[in-house]
Amino acid sequence: MTLQLDALSVLAPDGTALFAPLSLTVQPGEVASVTGPSGIGKSTLLAAVGGHLEPGFRLCGAVRLGGRDLGGLPAERRGIGMMFQEAVLFPHLSVADNLAFGLAPRHRGRRARRGAVAAALEQAGLAGFGPRDPATLSGGQRARAALMRTLLAEPRAVLLDEPFSGLDPERRDAIRRFAFDTIRAAGIPALLVTHDAEDVRAACGPVLALSRATDPTGGP
Amino acid sequence: MTSAHVLRAVSGAAILAGLGLPVLLGLGHGLAAAFGHFPAIGAHGPGLQPWRDLMAMPGIGRAAALALWTGLAATGLSLVLALGLVAWVQGRDRLRALRLLLAPLLAAPHAAIAIGLAFVLAPSGWIARALAPLAGWDRPPDIATTGDPLGLALILGLVAKELPFLVLVLAGALTQIPVRAHMAAGRSLGYGRAAVWLWLLLPQLWPLIRLPVLVVLAFSVSVVDMALILGPSAPPTLPVMIARLNADPDLQVLLPASAGGVLQLGLLLCAFAALWALARAAGATGRALLRRGARLQGADRALALPVLASAGTALAAVLALAGLLAWSVAFSWRWPDLFPAELTLRHWQATGRWGDTALASGLIALAATGLALVAAVAWLESADRLGRPAADRWLTALIHVPLLLPQLSFLTGLSGLMIRAPLPPLAAVIWGHWLFVFPYLMIALKGPWTALDPRLGRSAAALGAGPWRRLWRVKLPVLLAPLATAAAVGFAVSIAQYLPTLFLGGGRVETLTTEAVALASGSDRRVAAVHAVLQALLPWGVFLAALAVPAVLHRNRRGLGGAA
């Protein structure tokens, strides 16, 4: 399934465009990167693709997934997973329950669901972490748990909002590689926004720079 | 000892002596009297006679069950509706508008809403009048719409008052959790809004709103004024029954009344236990369901149900207030006319009927609020100067004691103590109001006070301003808006008090609330309406002033705009 952005832009409540219209096609198993100065609206771009725009913001252009226009679909019906910079594990649930919350409903039966969660934890190097309070995890562990939670929902595309920028520089590389490998293995298109050149290099996919809507040259 | 320590000691002692001690004494005296020990009226215990007398009262079992049922139902319904309403509004970013919309209902006293609702619901009220042409009623139908045996009208009245309160509480709690991030994370996993609320937000909100929900439950199980007006009558709810015993001229009846107060406390503990068990069961069931991963995308449409029910409740409350206004100026209003045929200001012009009462209400409220404001500021300021957290655990616990106990359980004992050591009635009433004004004022003021930028005080100190100058010239002016709001909250709480006036005033102090409740059962709706309208207008006026005064004084100070 391909993710296509077609002349996509976001209008702020006052009607001004945040960035120049953007077109991009991401193939399955590919990680595309969008870069740009902070404050230009990289996160807003992802919110627009995922269906999480704040009230008042409007989307111009089209988002297509497998040829289907997602415009007007609520976030929960888009099948687009999202990974945030802060990992956003739910603090009132154990690590295993966080993953179980993500696991797609087509897996039925308590035993099967528990098994799927345990396998995902194992794959992320978190075997035995299931009953833990997410607050006791390190940054890297949180990022991996959040990634597994996102993928267990079996999304048809993934958005990554600077998911590695909060991590220790030493661990960042290994977690990044794990994330990109896992996404490629899942065979879904991924869109990464970042201002880290290392992220872009490791993603090995198409790269696009966001530019201000008023900047006619396009690019910083 | 520094001045800060003195301030701390004085304010702490005043709060302890003024709030903790009397509640404890009242409770203890009530407990002793419940077991037959009440030397002031010649009873020496211990004995079980008061309990036998209480249990021998006709309908006592049903009265207790009614109190439990109406209280639990009203609290549960208010909570569900408030959650549904906030969940629906939050996605639309209209929380602020909703709070503004609900403010008038929040400030209107329970008794005023109850009297107004009685006008709307009664067989001769607005709803029946609207239906009369369709149903062909040529006189008011013979249906028990208020005072129905199941207490449904009482539940509606309680929900109309507690729903706005819980919405406000929820709106405050929502700012403490990352709602947007969790909503986006949950929806990107395929869950609908309603599912995110049930599984992600509510479990995180619950610890933050549990205490206010318990306050609502305590109030609803123990309410007297609203139950007198809207509740069933044969038998009434337990609190009404006990309050009537307390009003009996025969002092010996105070013994079973005290036992009733203790029973009321036991009833409330049962209600707390029921809520606790329910919350535990809901949490366990919720987690079990969550592990199954059902996305419940269709459940979002079900949110319309609580929203519609909330709108219906709010509409009933607005109609109630409009009904009060209409009756207060009605000259002749025949069945089945929807509006009075002739209007008159006669009831308003008869100032002799309501002038002194309104003045007394206002003065009592001003005095109680002023004292509470001084105590709160003294305590918070002493905490600042000593570098302690403003919200000491024991103080937080202490101010919730009068809100979590049934008023009857300790007011009965306190009024019993008054027989021996009589305060002047007016002073006793002011102090009785302060018991409830201070906690609410403190709750309203604590947040903004602790949120004040500490650098302001440090800058002033660096410029050579001493602690008192910093308080007067920097802190209090900057905090003017939240101080005014907290004072308005306190004023509204005082105006709404019913039992403290009744029990501590010894029948010699009349406020708008006691008058309105007394008149509500009488024949003249018009005079009752005048009192109820005044009862609602006074707090509204003070709330408007609380908004207007800082807005005018700070009109050229944009940095203070968000201080409230």
Image: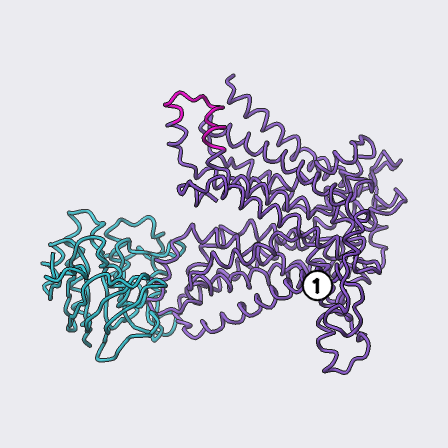
Q: Position of residue B271 (x, y in %)?
A: 64, 55
Q: Nearer the viewer, residue B417 or B106?
A: B106
All told, the count of numbered labels is 1
Magenta region: which residues? B460-476
Q: Report in which chain the residue with disc 1 lies.
A: B
Q: Position of residue A179 (x, y in %)?
A: 19, 61
Left or right of residue B169: residue B318: right
Is A192 left or right of B290, judged from the image as shown?
left
Q: Amino acid at mark 1?
A: Gly
Within 10 Å of disc 1 (Cα), the crowding (few <14, some 14-19, many 20+) is many
Occupied quadrant, residue A90: bottom left
The vertical placement of A100 against B253, above or below, is below
Residue A208 screen position, x and y as percent: 13, 63
Q: Nearer the viewer, residue A135 or B497?
A: B497
Q: Quickly name the residue at label 1.
A: B323
Q: Quadrant of residue A143?
A: bottom left
Looking at the colours in the rendered structure, which chain would you say is drawn in cyan? Answer: A
For the colour purple, the matching chain is B
Instruction: Label 1, secondary structure: give it.
Output: helix
The overriding secondary structure of the stretch rendered in magenta is helix
| Colour logic | by chain
| Left or right: B219 as drawn, with respect to B168 | right
